[in-house]
Image (cartoon, rainbow, N blue to C red):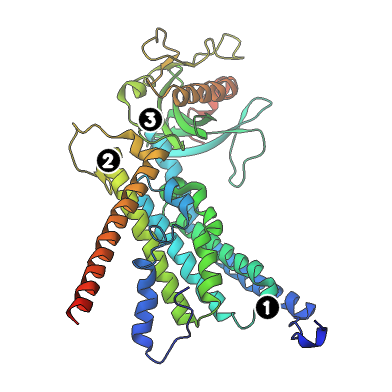
Amino acid sequence: MSAETLAAPQVTPTAVLLRVLGIVSAICGLIIVGSYEITLPAANANRRIALERAVLKVVPTAKTIAEYYALPAGGIEQAKGGEAPAGVAKFYAGYDDAGKLTGIAAEAGAKGYADLVRVMFGYDPVCQCVTGISVVSMRETPGIGDKILIDKDFLANFKELDVKLKEDMSALVNEVKAVKHGTKTNPWQIDAIAGATVTSRAVGKGINDAAQFLLPKLVPNIEKLKVKS
Amino acid sequence: MSTNTPVSTATAPRNMQEFMEGIWERNPVFVMVLGMCPTMAVTVSAINSISMGLATTFVLAASCWLVSLLRHVIPKEVRIATYIVIIATFVTVVDYAIQAISLEMYEALGAYIQLIVANCLVLGRAEAHAAKFPPVAATLNATGMGLGFTLGLTMIGGVREILGNGTLLGISLFGADFQPWVVMVLPPGGFFVMGGWLLLFAIYRERKDRGNAARTAEASHGA
């Protein structure tokens, strides 16, 4: 077969290919940036509402919330808005109408069964205990792992979970730990949900890690937070 | 493809046919069995299924419209790259939109929103239909396909939610004494329900075919 008998294959010039790809990408870029700009305020508002709801759930007496950072080197400072600096732990101080501190909320996270389990926990500086948890995000198995949201016995663990600091305020006296269902004997232990031990342990480990980091920095400075600044 | 004929003069019924194709005759979930990844993963509840379906519908309709609009401009050498860029754009738009509408929904659907980019239904429609038909027909066909996908997802999600959680769209159906079939909201449940629906449709189709065959035989016998 000679080359002449075949129809010459249509060849698109390189410049045309590049031009089409360039133009399509430019149009798509405009659409993406445009929709980002349009939806950003609503998405940010949603995030703020979700955060406030999570904080209010664990510090129900709060009327206003102030955001703080616990610095890795020790000490705390008020958040100035924008991205948090690397290495700091965010926490939220809740105040009543008179501007008096009613509780602290902080986020904790640890690997669960499916993915990271992120919870918000309330801390009461008076009893030095955790006073409640709520879930920020999780992808745990529906009907099993997600019981940490609704299981009454499990949630009762967090009515007065002991997170006292040592005298020198360097770490917790007792590590917070989830134990097998029915074997809880101490106020710093978490009675795991039967069948959802991995998720329960993630909550325990998350709270322990967060408390070990946050409380040694927070408790020595608690006076600074007592009255709303 | 049965639809690869140019749009004729009878536009209205033709458009209706384009639209209905995906909803019943070539339903993406039950007939073409496309896009199984979100079908299995997010159908743990009816509301998740509906949101996922509508998100996919938007991406399908918008991408097919743009692909169809640009069909004479896009050289075939770079068509896949172009389609994917267009699809990825509208997936990003949906991603932002859902964050603005409901963060809870965004959390529930997770990575499957972004994975719409890789849903073979979307690229399949762009390549097999939108690239060959004018924008109106392409958009109608894509919307029908999207709604058919939504319908399929919701039929699976509804059953899984009723059996696995005792609720439909969050409303309790059986009271507090109901013991949920947890397996239904776990991955195997997705396959069970999908298999159940496919079985029902297969039985229905076989009955219909048998009925048609009998009628044809009768007619030829009479003649």
Return the residue at label 2.
B163
Kindly identify the residue that appears in the image at 42 percent across and 34 percent down. A141
Percent x, y of residue A95: 42, 34
Dot 3 falls on which chain? A
Q: Which numbered disc, 1 or 2, marks the residue that appears first in the sequence?
A: 1
According to the picture, the residue beneath numbered tag 1 turns out to be B75
Subunit ID for the residue under disc 2: B
Q: Give SS at disc 1.
A: loop
Instruction: Give above or below for B103 relative to B218.
Output: above
Callout 3 and callout 2 share a chain: no
The residue carrying pointer 1 sits among few (fewer than 14), some (14 to 19) or many (20 or more) residues within 10 Å by Cα, namely some
Q: Is residue B64 visible?
A: yes
Q: Position of residue A53 (x, y in %)?
A: 40, 41
Query: Which label sits in the foreground, 3 or 1?
Result: 1
In the picture shown, does residue B203 fall above or below A184? below
Residue at image mark 3: A144
What's the distance in space between the residues labelled 1 and 2, CA to CA?
Answer: 50 Å
Q: Amino acid at mark 2?
A: Leu
- Do marks 3 and 1 share a chain? no
Q: Which amino acid, by three-letter code, is at mark 1? A: Pro
- Of all chains, the one bearing label 1 is B
Q: Which sits in the foreground, A19 or B189?
A: B189
Position of residue A78 in the picture relative to residue A157 (left or right): right
Q: Residue at the spot x=27%, y=40% of the render?
A: B163
Local secondary structure at mark 2 = helix
Which quarter of the picture shows residue A122? top left
The three-letter amino acid code for the residue at tag 3 is Ile
Residue at 46% from the left image edge and 32% from the top image edge: A120
